Image (cartoon, grey):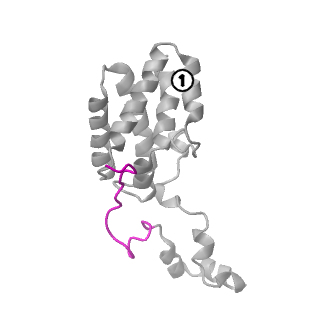
């Protein structure tokens, strides 16, 4: 029962976690990053409900999952912040303070809910990105009425359209997520 109430909250917090979104969108770790993130959400919800955890333990679990599953290390203290929010929401659920819980959830920034989708319907992370990418990368091909026929007729040209990590050839390396707070 508690898991069923807490899982949507976990999904919402992980949906808003920039480090996780970047790791999935940029294809960090193994293929199928979105499915991995969805399974991570299930694991985190069960871990919190079935164990007695504190912020530091949960932050360590989040850091380990990001490192092991997405080859991503967060230097911005966000795992601790996510852990703090998760445990605060879980505490509100356990105490039956549903009105306060709902008010805090509604105060959170709105985002695309990609973790709440069923796992079997998810799309590989390489398909995510800027929807304008398809139109801006073409250099006048749309003006040529024969361009669609050429793409369909010649399989050698379709090899150029295989999914690749975003801008890996231009700027290889790590994406660094830093804190916005000044110390």
- Residue labelled with disc 1: 101
Q: Secondary structure at mark 1?
A: helix
**Residue 130 position within the rendered picture, expressed as x and y whole percent measured from the top left:** 56, 63
Residue found 54% across the figure and 38% down from its top: 116
Mainly helix, strand or loop, the magenta region?
A: loop
Q: Is 167 situated above or below 31?
A: below
Residue found 63% across the figure and 73% down from its top: 135
Q: Nearer the viewer, residue 97 or 71?
A: 97
Write the start and end of the magenta stretch as one range.
Answer: 164-183
Residue 178 within the segment the image draws in magenta: yes
**Residue 7 position within the rendered picture, expressed as x and y whole percent measured from the top left:** 48, 28
Q: Nearer the viewer, residue 140 or 22?
A: 22
Q: Is 3 situated above or below 65?
A: above
Residue 150 within the segment the image draws in magenta: no
Quadrant of the image occupied by residue 133: bottom right
Crowd band around label 1 with a 10 angstrom C-alpha radius: few (<14), some (14–19), many (20+): some
Q: Is residue 12 visible?
A: yes
**Residue 58 position within the rendered picture, expressed as x and y whole percent measured from the top left:** 31, 31
Q: Is residue 124 left or right of residue 81?
A: right
Q: Is residue 46 left or right of residue 108?
A: left
Q: Is residue 19 left or right of residue 4?
A: left
Q: Is 63 situated above or below 86?
A: below
**Residue 180 position within the rendered picture, expressed as x and y whole percent measured from the top left:** 40, 51
Q: Nearer the viewer, residue 66 or 120?
A: 66
Q: Is residue 32 visible?
A: no
Q: Nearer the viewer, residue 158 or 115?
A: 115
Residue found 41% across the figure and 48% down from its top: 20
């Amino acid at each position: 029962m508690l898991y069923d109430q807490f899982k949507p909250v976990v999904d919402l917090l992980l949906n808003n976690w920039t480090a996780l979104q970047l790791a999935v969108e940029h294809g960090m770790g193994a293929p199928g990053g979105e499915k991995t993130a969805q399974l991570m959400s299930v694991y985190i919800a069960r871990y919190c409900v079935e164990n007695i955890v504190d912020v530091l333990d949960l932050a360590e679990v989040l850091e380990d999952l990001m490192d092991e599953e997405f080859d991503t290390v967060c230097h911005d203290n966000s795992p601790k912040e996510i852990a703090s929010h998760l445990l605060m929401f879980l505490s509100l659920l356990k105490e039956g303070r549903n009105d306060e819980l709902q008010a805090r959830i509604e105060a959170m920034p709105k985002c695309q809910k990609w973790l709440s989708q069923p796992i079997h319907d998810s799309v590989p992370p390489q398909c995510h990105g800027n929807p304008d990418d398809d139109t801006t990368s073409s250099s006048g091909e749309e003006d040529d009425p024969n361009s669609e026929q050429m793409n369909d007729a010649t399989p050698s040209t379709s090899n150029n359209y295989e999914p690749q990590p975003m801008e890996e050839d231009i700027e290889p390396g790590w994406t660094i997520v830093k804190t916005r707070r000044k110390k």
